[in-house]
Amino acid sequence: MLPGSYYTGLSAVLFVIGVTGVLVRRNPLVIFMSIEVMLNAANLALVGFGAQFGTADGQVLVFFGMTVAAAEVAVGLAIIMAIFRLRRRLSVDDLSAMRW
Amino acid sequence: MPLAVFLVVAAVAVASALGLVLKRNPIHGALFLIVNLGSIAVMYLTLHAQFLAWAQVIIYAGAIMILFVFAIMVLIPGKEETGPDPLRPVRLIAIPFGALLLVELVLMLVSRRAAPVAAVPAPGGVEAIGRLLFTDYLFPFELTSVLLLAAMIGVLALAKSRKAG
């Protein structure tokens, strides 16, 4: 098996791409998908570390992370839909007010 | 041979993540993200995490991405990022900061004392994960049911139209 540093290195690259996507894009859906890339990078690092130490605990953590991601996507998309219904526009630059 | 598989799949993962960030059309981004999630599932397979690989395909590439594609279809997107961007110079600062973050992460990984690779690979089948879930991690496992229920009720409350309520 390959050394774990290969997997953590790939995970670091994917995480940085996700961070850049969140910062650069204007569409909240694409920002959300970039967050998914970051979550997956963290999951890959967890599985890589688990393989390095020969335990399955990292995989159980990733399983819980997937559950949380599923709940997060459902709630987040519902919030984006609610904002779209209210505003008829969908750009994060318009959403600078905390109340209106 | 494992190195070749790793390099090819890693190249696919990085290229599809870049495609998600660089392509303007969100539906192209969603398709790139599906490729990315699939390549990470292959990574799990090379790490002997068979259960996670299939869970990744079913939960992420299946369920979560269908939600995304439905949302993209409903929200008629693609018009947000066509006009001129008033904040473009501010936004481009993200690229050097992203590069800085990458340098920091790589430095941290390099300076870390490298642990020896475990002689026996971690068990990754359904049996091993299920045994851990129902013994050591029983309480968090039960908590996830509360989390999913809360998410379901929250989504119903958010999606309900205001006039009916």
Image (tube, coloured by chain):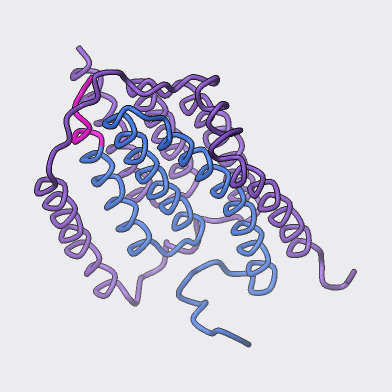
Chain colours: A blue, B purple
Image quarter where the N terminus of chain A lies is top left
B138 relative to A28, above or below: above
- The spot of residue B118 in percent (x, y) is 24, 25
Name the residue located 49 percent from the left edge and 19 percent from the top edge. Answer: B125
Magenta span contains residue A4: yes
Q: Left of B41 or right of it: where is B71?
A: right
Location of residue B103 (image quadrant): bottom left
Residue found at the far front of this picture? B135
Name the residue located 33 percent from the left edge and 24 percent from the top edge. Answer: B47
- The spot of residue B138 in percent (x, y) is 61, 40
Magenta span contains residue A97: no
Q: Nearer the viewer, residue B83 or A99?
A: A99
Location of residue B116 (image quadrant): top left
Q: Left of A81 or right of it: where is A58?
A: left
Q: Left of B98 or right of it: where is B149?
A: right
Q: Nearer the viewer, residue A45 or A96?
A: A45
- The spot of residue B26 in percent (x, y) is 47, 49
Residue found at the far top of this picture? B1
- The spot of residue B141 in percent (x, y) is 61, 42
Image quarter where the C terminus of chain A lies is bottom right
Q: Which residues are magenta?
A: A1-7
